[in-house]
Amino acid sequence: MSRTRTALLALALTAASGVASAQPADVIHWWTSGGESKAVNVFATEFDARGGKWVDNAVVGGPAARAAALNRIAGGNPPAATMWNVGVAVRQLAEQGMLTELDDIAKAGKWVENLPPLIVKNISYNGHIIAVPVDLHGGNWMFYSKKIYDELKIQPAKNWDEFLIQAEKIKAAGYIPLSIGGQPFQEVWLWLPVLLGSAGKEDFKKIYADHDAKLAAGPGVKKAFEVMRKLAAYTDAGRPNRKWNDSLLLVQNNKAASQFLGDWGKGEFAAAGLKPQIDYGCAMAPGNDGAYMMNVDVFAFPKSKNPTTIAAQRKLAEVMMDPAVQVKFNAFKGALPARLDADTGALDACAQIGKAIIDGGPANQMPNTALAFSPDVDGQITDLITQYFNSTTMTAEAATAAFAKIIANADK
Amino acid sequence: MRSLAARLVLSPTALITLVCFYGCAVWTAYISLTRSSFFPNYEFSGIAQYTRLFSTERWNVAYANMFIFGVLLVAGALALGIILALMIDRNVRGEGFFRTIMLYPLAMSFIVTGLAWQWVLSPSIGVQHFVRDLGFPDFTFDWVARQDRAIYTLVFAGVWHQAGLIMAIMLAGLRGVDRDIWKATRIEGIPVWRVYLGIVLPMLRPLVVTCVVLLSVAVVKSYDLVVAMTGGGPGFASDLPGKFVVEFSFERANIGQASAAAVVMLGSIFAALAPYFYIEMRRKAT
Amino acid sequence: MSVGRIGLYIFLAGAALFFAIPLLIVVMTSLKPMDEIRAGSIFAWPMAPGFAAWVKAWSSACTGLACNGIQVGFWNSFQILIPSVVLSVSAGAINGYALAQWKPPGANMLLTALMLGAFIPYQVILYPMVKIMSNVGLYNSLPGIVAIHIIFGLPVMTLIFRNFYAGLPDELLKAARVDGAGFWRIFWEIMLPISVNILVVAVILQVTGIWNDYLLGLIFAGREYAPMTVQLNLIVNSQMGEQEHNVNMAATLLTALPPLLVYVASGRYFVRGITAGAVKG
């Protein structure tokens, strides 16, 4: 009897010490594709090398992963770390007192000095740092088929009017001018560069970052809606509910001339063995020169009472904010490191274009919807854009008025 | 005392029903009267969520779709299921084959069969493309891309998914009908179709009730179907309340709106079912 | 053969085609290599059918960092399925029998409450249920997910058994009670033996419903017991990378096999004559 008990005790102790020596951290994220998995693996390997134990908890799809994280927090069994798109949502978590503050690590690692100010704002709550930004995706890229552009002897358009003229030419040559899948978020990916190119980057920033309702009702926005309607005519019939990567295949196979999306598109080309600016082209969207629309993934650390978990969380934060680790991570992810002091010389030709813009200072650093609005307002804008883009009857005036109304009520 | 065992057996069910279904529903109803966004917030704020809900065009579309989709799916699956059951009941050869092929859709998850349907309906690779290649260049079948038609493609796939189950249940019922009835009607020379319509189907009424309930539950819970087939599009033309609620509770971090939508959904379903339940109860009472 | 018979067969054949088309597309696609899928029509027969995609789907398709295929979820799903089906079907049968044959006071009220409960969308109940489950210590565990399936299965299971037992003649119970049989003995010796057909229907419903469940498994089962559908979704709905449609389709078919087998195997029970008088007006 007592021998059994001793054996059990010993077993429990070894188990406990085993846990203590390698700090386990289970991490919820939604990076499940080839390139993304490789990127996550950079964090996992480095974390393990520094004495942690990465417990991978991949959930397909952002919404499902976020729901899983929220449910586990609500259920009193939070993960050590959970991924999120930076923005108002993360601050709402902090507002509920659910996130670990990382002030001392941030200070030691000089985070604030080396991040874009808009990002710092979004990872702070009440003056405390509450999340770790790991990448800096650019959302306003145009990927195009070099073959079609060369064949028709055209260059990436400098503004949307020029793009529309080219589109007519491309259509006449028997290609699909604009590839897009009919999912609302893809239509928003198109809307953002159209608005930025139509309203100009100063006005765009005032509407998005400062929620200027008067400008939101102005001619720049109306122009953007008019361009959207014209663009819809240059898409193909296979659009409904098509995934964005299936749409990008049309560009890869030179059936469609261009697609507008973030730099995560590069991962698709890379997986097919295609090289940027050689096998396919990348350029800022028409009228988007000198503007980098930031889309940032962060990790947040739900509060824990377990000292082992706390130690693991702190170690994870250090690993993820290490400039060298961020460069390695983003080589797979297709983005720029969130840290502006990281050495990006090794990244590809498209990334170099983006890096030059982002280094131009805060005037070039644009918010995407998640950085600018709460998920709720974000959703209202998405609904409006998809309704308009798929409608044949809604006028640009009506859409502009609806848009201005959303912006005016954004902070209520 | 005669039903003590029955009462004991039923009490856990009663408790679970009360707590898990009604307790949770009451909680949701309360949340719909607050300003909850990311997390529940218990501060009462009146009917603001409902005012906003009904001024949201997307909700109005989704709400109307629930009725279109619901009525057509229940009617379509019930009609097709019963017709198939009656036919198979006529001693057809290869019954096992027909039965299996009509039932299998239920065994398959919509995660991928939805994709197969999406391909079939897609104008660029599906039926339209196929028929045009056969030499009918003007043939058009692009409902999935049209805002005014997309919802019907969901009905199509929904009937495909559910009709087999209805067929199976009704067939099981038909096989249970007393053989003497058939003998008697044959002796009296009553035509087969009249026996079915006038005698057999009314006998199967409880099974039809079961079918209607099962189908209505499927309507209320259709979420995978929309997500896999149309994603609610084009635009939000084929959105359904189930998807609206999920999107608002998680992606949009607005459980106040989600709860209000859920309450309206529940209320409408109960209102739609009430007369039916009332008639059934009266019928039982007499 | 009469004209009517021929028409009947033509209609049935047409219906069979309507039902079969998506399956045909899924099967054919799973047997094609990717090049053929990209180039050819979805309705085209595979030129050189092969099972490479099936092998990959089963043993080496990637879900996140792990590349062990869909087999990982297979065993989990079984562990969830067996107790969930057995318990929820039993609960439904006993409830239905108690409600229909013994008619205790409040039976109609409970029945109505259960029926209406079936219409409450999952989404409404999820959040508070997570709280309840974690308070009783069952959140993210095997017993937890089984309990959830039993709870969500209660309304429909109870309803179909009640309707079946309500259709039986009252004399059956009366005679048994005159013979001195009690609640349980009547259930075991009289009711269950004549319930085979409705049991088959109930088992079919639950096997497919629980096996194909995604949402509840994702939220309540936790990482350790993630069912096969969650694995399937990880493989199929990965947002990035070219979709390997053949592997996706093969993975779907593999996931659908257990319920499909149940259907094929239980089909003959429908053919057998059902107890006379099973359906009453």
Image (tube, coloured by chain):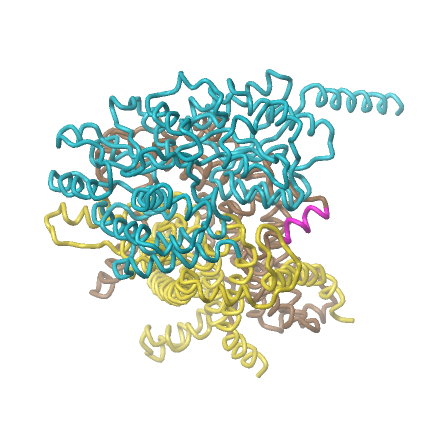
- Residue in view at x 47 percent, y 53 percent: C269
- Is residue A146 shown left or right of residue A398? left
Percent coordinates x, y for residue A279 in the rendering: 24, 23
The answer to whether any part of residue B91 appears in the image is no
Nearest the eye: C63 or A71: A71
Q: Quadrant of the N terminus of chain A?
A: top right
The image quarter containing residue C161 is: bottom right
Q: In percent of the image, x 57 and y 69: which residue is there? A: C168
Q: Is residue B119 left or right of residue B247?
A: left
Q: Decide which of A143, C25 is in the foreground and name it.
A: A143
For the point 58% across and 43% down, the residue is A91
B245 relative position to B62: left or right: right
Q: Which residue is rendered at x = 48% and y = 37% of the image?
A: A60
Q: Position of residue A392 (x, y in %)?
A: 25, 58
Please tell me whether residue B46 belongs to the stretch shown in magenta: no
In the rendered image, residue C14, in percent from the top left (x then y), is placed at 26, 55
In the image, the segment drawn in magenta is: C128-136
Most distant residue in the bottom direction:
B286
Q: Where is residue A176, by image quadrant?
A: top left
Q: In the rendered image, is residue C236 in sight? A: yes
Q: Nearer the viewer, residue A367 or B148?
A: A367
> Which secondary structure dominates the residues rendered in magenta?
helix
Residue A325 lies, in percent from the top left, at: 51, 20
User: What is the tally of numbered marks visible in this picture?
Assistant: 0
The colour assigned to chain A within the rendered structure: cyan
Chain coloured yellow here? B
Question: What is the residue that sits farthest to the right in this orientation?
Answer: A2
A8 relative to B97, above or below: above
Q: Quadrant of residue A76?
A: top right
Shade of chain C as shown in the rendered figure: brown
